Each structure stands twice: as C-alpha cells, then as structure tokens.
Amino acid sequence: MSKFIVRGGNRLIGNVKVSGAKNSVLPIIAASLLGGEGESTIYDAPPLDDVFTITKVLESLGVSVSYDNEVLRVNAEQITTCEAPYEYVRKMRASFLVMGPLLTRMGHTRISLPGGCAIGSRPIDQHLKGFEALGAEINLGQGFIEAKSNGRLRGAKIYLDVASVGATENIMMAATMAEGTTVIENAAKEPEIVDLANYLNSMGAKVRGAGTGEIRIEGVEKMYGVKHTVIPDRVEAGTYMVAAAITGGDVYVEGAIADHLGPVISKMEEMGVKIEPDENGIRVIANHPLRSVDIKTLPYPGFPTDMQSQMMSLLLVSEGTSVVTETVFENRFMHVDEFQHMNAEIKVEGRSAIITGRAKLNGAKVCATDLRAGAALILLGLVANGTTEVSGVHHIDRGYVHIAEKLSALGADIWRITVDEPVLEPVLEHAVQPKVKDEVKRFSAQPTWV
Ligand SMILES: CC(=O)N[C@H]1[C@@H](OP(=O)(O)OP(=O)(O)OC[C@H]2O[C@@H](n3ccc(=O)[nH]c3=O)[C@H](O)[C@@H]2O)O[C@H](CO)[C@@H](O)[C@@H]1O
Ligand SMILES: C=C(OP(=O)(O)O)C(=O)O
C-alpha cells in the first residue's frame, strides 16, 4: 500500500508538463477496436492505471496491444471474443466504452455492468437508449449486459436526456459503421469528444458536429488503424494551476490549452490569480490574499465537475465565504469529511457546500475517496501546517502521472512511501508448521487458505 507524505509551506515555482488526457485516451483506445485493417499508434498515451486496465480489456478480446514510453500500439484486425471480463470493468467504468465499437463491428457484445463509484450511481441508461435506437437488442443478465444486432446497426435520431460524455462517445462509436445517418441531440460537448471524433474520422468515419450539442454520423463500411496524438489533460493542467495559486507560487503549466479551461481560468482570475496563457501553455502567478468566489459545476463548457474538489481547496485559503454547487454528480462531496480532518470549515447542504475561507489548515492522515478528491487533499497538504499523509493512492494513480515527482520538481515537499500491507496473523484452531506461517508472511497479507 502506498501513501503520499506532504509537508506544507513551500511556494511552487517552475515549469510542469501536462500529460495526455485520461478522458481522451480511454475512449480513443476503445475506438481502436473499430480498426479492421492496420495498426493504430496513439502518442502521448499517459502511463496511468486506467490506460493499463483498458488495454487489458482489449487484450482479453484477442486484440494485440503494446505500450512503450507513452506510445500505445493497437492492432484490432483480429477480435476473438466479444465478452469484456468483469475483473476489468469492475475496476474502471470507462471499460464500458468498448460496448459501442464491439456492437457495431461484431454485431454482439457482453459486458459486465459497470459499478458506480464514490461520486454517484453513474447509470448507463442513456448508453443503452442509444444502442436500442440503433437497432440493438439489449438483455440484462446477472451483473452483465448483452447487446446484439440483427445484421448492421441502422442509423437513428437519438436525443440524450442527459448530456452524458460516455453515452455520447459510446453511441458515436456505435454509429460509425451503422447503415445510414445517426444524429445525436443534446450531445456532450467536452474537448475529449472532439478529440475522439478526430480520431474516428482519421480511421475513416464520417463524424460531424463534435463539440456541439448535435453530432451527425454517416455510417461507413470499414475503418482503419491510424496514428493519433492525444490532447493534453485539461484536468491535470487545472490541478497544477490550483497548486500554483494555493501556494502563492509562479508556475508555467506547459501544454495546457486555455480554450479547454475557460471557466477554471475565469474563476481563478475572479479570485485574483494572474493567468497568462500563450501558445504553449499557461503561466499562473498568485500571492495571497485571494478573493472568495462561488462555483457551480455544469456540463462543458460550464465549470468542470472534475475540478470541483481542487477549487474547493483553493477557496479554503481565500478571503471570505464561498458556495460550491455540484450539479453533475449526486455524491461528489466525499472529500469534505477529509478536508474537515485538516480543520477546514465546510457545511454541506444538499448539492451545495459552504466554505469558510482563511482556514488554518493542519496536516493530518486523510484518505482519497476518488481521484480528484485525492489530488485536492495533496493540494491542501501543500499549505497545511505540518505533515499530511494521503492514503487511497490507487485513486490518484488512475488520473495523475507521477504527481509527486511533478510537484516535487516545483519545490513541493512531497514524497511517496510504500507501506507493507499489515500481515494478518492467521487465527487457526490447529497449530500449523512454521513453514506455512512463513509462507503466509512472505507472500500475502491474506492467509492463502481463504
Ligand atoms: C472517462 C471519462 O471520460 N470520465 C468523465 C465522464 O464520465 P461519464 O461519462 O461517466 O460521465 P457522464 O457525463 O456520463 O455523467 C454525467 C451525469 O450523467 C448521468 N448519467 C450518465 C450516463 C447515463 O446513461 N445516465 C445518466 O444519468 C451520470 O449519473 C452523471 O450524473 O464525464 C464526467 C462528467 O464530465 C467526468 O466527471 C468524468 O471524468
Ligand atoms: C470521474 C473521473 O473519471 P472516471 O469517469 O474515469 O471515474 C475523473 O476523471 O474525475
């Protein structure tokens, strides 16, 4: 088990490079299943746990995948099975994005139901609504979903009741090889959807309107492996912008695209942070005190929910009282309890949290409840008195490449430690030979017989 140890008090100064976007590379890897001829080469693929999880899903489908130095190669000429294993879908919801590509290319797929997670139930009804509109027959089994089409999928007009990112992506991918035209109305508009559409069009698809509320897809017969470079991760970039601001630092976030961060830039400027974008990144300069502002998360181009917890950290050190309203997920204030362990004064009322600024934050042992909450706890640790220990690191590893190294290079006092799993002393009725006991100690925290 790993933990991050953070000692507060250092201003961050210097240059940090943003990695490829998690929320772009995951659908792009899933879309690679559509390439019936040739190999896809995906550049700037970040070495994140989620990337390795979805590549395991593709390998379990019989697809050949290799990864080296942020370059991912996928050859999906052969797909030997259409069933995505539970062990991976359980680990990462985005594995569900293989459903659309498999359905349109193979005519059949069976996927374990993706679980919810700390931030909400995260249903998939809109995904299924789109697949059914395209002509698929959907059967819900014990913990899995089966979809099959009788021949090619047929283009349809689909209105999304919720501007869901994943549903927009899954349906867009399914429609690429359907017969005729598909129109997705009330589509999500995130930059990652535009990046995915660009990749699909390079593969031979005909997708128009990505980034707007209406996406039109003309079905094609075949798609091909291609080369593609993933866009920079706007949420990682925003997280380092907050790290600069919260410590009163001066940081250049290399690779950040200002157009993808409009609401985050606007809100930080309202707080008094100096933001200087240029063609290669964004410089962030801050000195306290910062003004408090209110934040309301919305689908893109509104304020991103994935930056909510990080901004809450910044609001804690600003002057005055702020209100943060989370409209996208029903349970994305799990980090508040952990913030309160650090002496933060926050009151949650329904979908809103009232934050009292000028917090006198104290280092504490805290636990990440989701990947952005984990990042936000590290941000608080940068300014808390004393030392903060952040556990639940597996959440953070899903979405941040080398976060301790990147922050440390900016002057943060942060490092990662590995803590041995507590060895569970077996409680046995009968004495066991010391050999077995030693084996248990050596290889697992869990007695081998359970
Ligand atoms: C891998 C990836 O890209 N993850 C992002 C994606 O997640 P994801 O695609 O799962 O998020 P959605 O946009 O689908 O979810 C937004 C809201 O729609 C609801 N909903 C979604 C689907 C559905 O069929 N029915 C339904 O009701 C969800 O419960 C949630 O309340 O978009 C989220 C919202 O920007 C981001 O926080 C995630 O980082
Ligand atoms: C919620 C997030 O990701 P995911 O949808 O992969 O859980 C996120 O990136 O903040």
Image: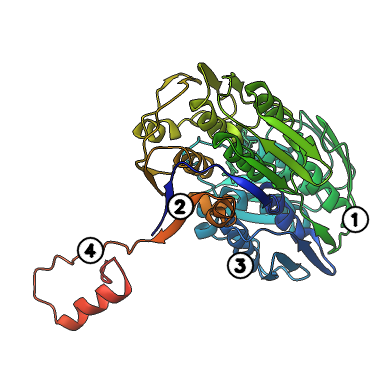
Relative placement, left or right, of 121 versus 184 is left
Q: Which amino acid does label 4 sit on?
A: Leu
Q: CA separation, marks 4 and 2?
A: 21 Å
Q: Which type of secondary structure does the marked residue at label 1 adopt? A: loop
- Tell me the residue at 37%/30% (across/down): 340
> With respect to residue 126, does 266 lie above or below?
above
Q: Which of 297 and 172 is in front in this view?
A: 297
Q: CA separation, marks 1 and 2?
A: 39 Å
Q: CA separation, marks 2 and 3?
A: 26 Å
Q: Residues within 10 Å of mark 2 (few under 14, many from 20)?
A: many
Q: Nearer the viewer, residue 272 or 369?
A: 272
Residue labelled 1 has its Cβ within 8 Å of some atom of ligand 1: no
Residue labelled 2 has its Cβ within 8 Å of some atom of ligand 2: no
- Tell me the residue at 77%/40% (across/down): 191
> How far from the left and from the top, in percent, is residue 259?
79, 35
> With respect to residue 344, does 149 lie above or below?
below
Q: What residue type is labelled 1?
A: Gly
Q: CA separation, marks 4 and 1?
A: 55 Å
Q: CA separation, marks 1 and 3?
A: 25 Å
Residue 60 is labelled as: 3
Q: Earlier in the sequence, mark 3 or mark 4?
A: 3
Q: Which of marks 4 and 2 is nearer the N terminus?
A: 2
Relative placement, left or right, of 98 versus 402 is right
Q: From where the camera sits, is residue 175 visible?
A: no
Q: Name the residue under label 1.
A: 204
Residue 424 is labelled as: 4
Q: Name the residue under label 2.
A: 393
Q: Which of marks 2 and 3 is nearer the N terminus?
A: 3
Q: Which of marks 1 and 2 is nearer the N terminus?
A: 1
Quadrant observed for ligand 1 in the rendered image: top right
Q: Where, quadrant-wise, is the C terminus in this rendering?
A: bottom left
> With respect to residue 305, does 415 lie above or below?
below
